[in-house]
Image: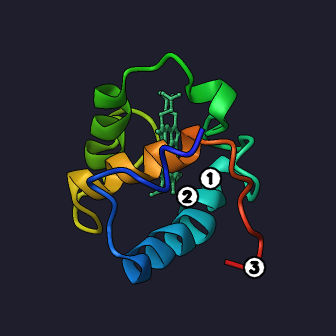
């Protein structure tokens, strides 16, 4: 599966790098450096499979009230959050050097 690479809504390459950096630095602080879970739930392809894109994007945009998951709306657009979810759902391992 390579949906992450050829989606029509994909941000430009520089922005993709910035988003993956954010994913590693900021999301990783709670979801674990390898995104297998920590304070936050795992964001592995297995954990996210079958969950509606709409809900996952809404969680990233607005956070989850009552949980530590913060809103990321100030830092990325909805299309970018969607791209991140597609990236997370792909089998691509997170590069620890990002
Ligand atoms: C301060 C800690 C924290 C940070 C930082 C954080 N999260 Fe979360 N996130 C959580 C927690 C806790 C949950 C689980 C909420 C719940 O119990 O429903 C969660 C849930 C989620 C979910 C829903 C998962 C599911 O299976 O439904 C997604 C998607 C998600 N986070 C993505 C992200 C992304 C992308 C980032 C970075 C841009 C991020 N999170 C940063 C704490 C965090």
> Is label 1 within 8 A of ligand 1 (CB to nearest ligand atom)?
yes
In the displayed structure image, the side of residue 30 where residue 71 appears, left or right: left
Residue 72 visible to an observer of this rendering: no
In the displayed structure image, the side of residue 32 where residue 30 appears, left or right: left
| Label 3 secondary element | loop
Distance of label 1 from label 3 (alpha carbons): 18 Å
Q: Which residue is mark 2?
A: 27
Between residue 41 and residue 66, name the one nearer to us: 41
Q: Nearer the viewer, mark 3 or mark 2?
A: 3
Image coordinates for residue 50, horizontal then vertical, percent: 51, 16
Distance of label 1 from label 2 (alpha carbons): 6 Å
Q: How many marks?
A: 3
Q: Which residue is mark 3?
A: 97
* Mark 3 vs 2, N-terminal side: 2
Q: Nearer the viewer, mark 1 or mark 3?
A: 3
Between residue 8 and residue 85, name the one nearer to us: 8
Most extreme residue toward the bottom is: 14
Coloration mode: rainbow
Image coordinates for residue 71, horizontal then vertical, percent: 31, 52
Residue drawn where x is 37% and y is 21% of the image: 52
Residue drawn where x is 74% and y is 54% of the image: 93
In the displayed structure image, the side of residue 10 where residue 31 appears, left or right: right
Rendered image: mark on residue 54:
none
Rendered image: mark on residue 30:
1
Badge 3: residue crowd in 10 Å (few <14, some 14–19, many ≥20): few
Badge 1: residue crowd in 10 Å (few <14, some 14–19, many ≥20): some
């Amino acid at each position: 599966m390579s949906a992450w690479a050829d989606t029509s809504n994909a941000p430009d390459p520089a922005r993709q790098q910035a988003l993956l950096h954010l994913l590693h630095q900021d999301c990783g602080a709670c979801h674990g450096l390898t995104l297998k879970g920590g304070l936050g739930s795992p964001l592995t392809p297995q954990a996210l499979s079958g969950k509606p894109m709409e809900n996952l994007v809404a969680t990233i945009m607005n956070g989850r009230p009552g949980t530590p998951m913060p809103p990321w709306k100030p830092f990325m657009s909805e299309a970018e959050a969607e791209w991140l979810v597609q990236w997370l759902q792909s089998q691509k391992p997170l590069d620890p050097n990002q």
